[in-house]
Amino acid sequence: MTMNTDASRHTAYKIWLDELNTVPANVFFSTFKQFLDLIITENPDKIESLRDVIDNQTTNLVDSANKAVKELEKLLAKVEQEAKKEKIVFLPESDHYKQVKNGEIKVMGQDLPDTLYHAIRLTIEAHRKDGKLESFDNLLSVNDNFWYLDYAKVCEAYPAYKQFKDTKDDFEQKRTEEPWGVYIYLKWAPTFFKNVTPEQAGSFVRTDMISGLRRFILYLLTPDLTGNKKQVVKEETVYKITYTPIREILLNNTIRLAKPDFDSENDVTFDYLYNHPNQKISLKELEEQLKKSLTKSLHKIIENLGFRGDLKTVFFTVSQDAVCFRNPITQDELEKLGISKIKLP
């Protein structure tokens, strides 16, 4: 069965919803599942567009979290170094963060910067109260003779964490609106059938599930407010590089291109370029910022980082004396480079 117009879909969906309101309880779940599968099958473009939007928003949050972790880990290293000078031998909050990062304690990846921030906060506050860790007074405030880590001061000194918090707040707000609302429903509804029997669910579930289905249908039948679909696709990100806190260079968060050694020439060079995307940076500026002379050419460093062939063409413009790291890459930018799809080396 294929429906060619919004009008015919609207009519069919109304009939299905009316039927769901009246079918006997013993066949409600099976009927609901059948209708949901048909609706998804009838709207492939809208479903694909929905998932693209969610993937892009999630990628932005993860990218922001990675930058925050990378920045705050520098502060954690200073705290641990100072603690060693003060002969503080046990930092439980720091150890807890490292267990979380290594996956020994499970939290969502986007919560990792907050876990790190609280590890730093609790460590500084506990030992500043003992008269130690005075070197972090610039990040502290005092209230009733109690020293505490000042969130605003940390955000000013480490802006990537503030950016992460803003991104996360925006992300949480979006999850209460469309398209996140229907996306969460779409993920939840099929799973519900696998885990709950009609007897366990009870009759109250019918109203909630029909209400969610009605919301999903409304989203599918609403014209795309962004306009022409082809234009939207051209402006969407198709390729993106992420530099993780453990120095993995990932393409679209899945394909690992390289993992430079810590503080190596490749590591510090890419770290700077990654944090200054879409800017022409001269070799002189790069060496001044890194406070070291590069022993390899910019071409060689980029190739060492896994950018060869199409990857190098798409993400870099490079000469002997300057470099520009392009990130992320939209469909429109890809077409301008004369490449339809990156061929991996």
Image (cartoon, helix red, strand yellow):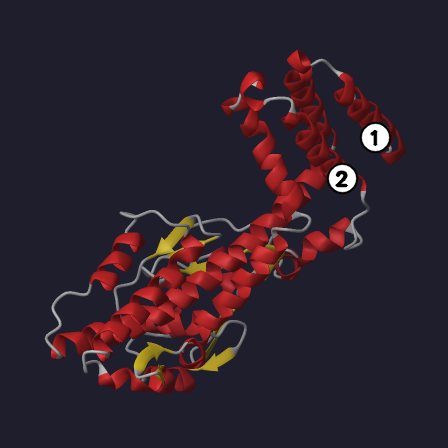
Q: Amino acid at mark 2?
A: Leu
Residue 72: image location, x then y, percent:
35, 70
Please tell me which residue lies in front, 191 or 276: 191
Residue 326 in the figure: left or right of residue 3: left
Badge 2 local density, few (<14 within 10 Å), some, or many (20+)? Answer: many
Q: Position of residue 217 (x, y in %)?
A: 76, 36
Residue 202 visible from this viewpoint: yes
The crowd level at tag 1 (other Cα within 10 Å; few <14, some 14-19, many 20+) is some
Q: Position of residue 270 (x, y in %)?
A: 38, 69
Report x, y in % for residue 104.
27, 47
Check residue 220 in the rendering and tell me which mark sits there, or answer none: 2
Identify the mark nearer the N-term, 2 or 1.
1
Residue 275: quarter of image: bottom left
The picture quadrant where one finds residue 81 is bottom left
Quarter of the picture holding the N terminus = top right
Q: Are marks 2 and 1 in contact (CB under 8 Å)?
A: yes
**Spatial separation of the CA atoms under disc 2 and disc 1:** 10 Å
User: Is 240 or 13 nearer to us in this picture?
Assistant: 13
Residue 265 seen: no
Q: For the point 57% across and 57% down, which residue is it? A: 171
Residue furthest out toward the right: 7
In this rendering, would 324 be left or right of 334?
left
Where disc 1 sits, the SS reads helix
Front residue of 242/50: it is 50
Numbered mark located on residue 9 in the image? 1
Q: Residue at x 80, y 54 (%)?
A: 227
Give the residue type at disc 1. Arg
Identify the residue at image location x=72%, y=41%: 46
In the displayed structure, 174 sits above or below 322; it is above
Q: What number of labels is visible?
A: 2
Who's the residue at 24% across and 72% down the image?
Answer: 126
Left or right: 145 as drawn, with respect to 221:
left
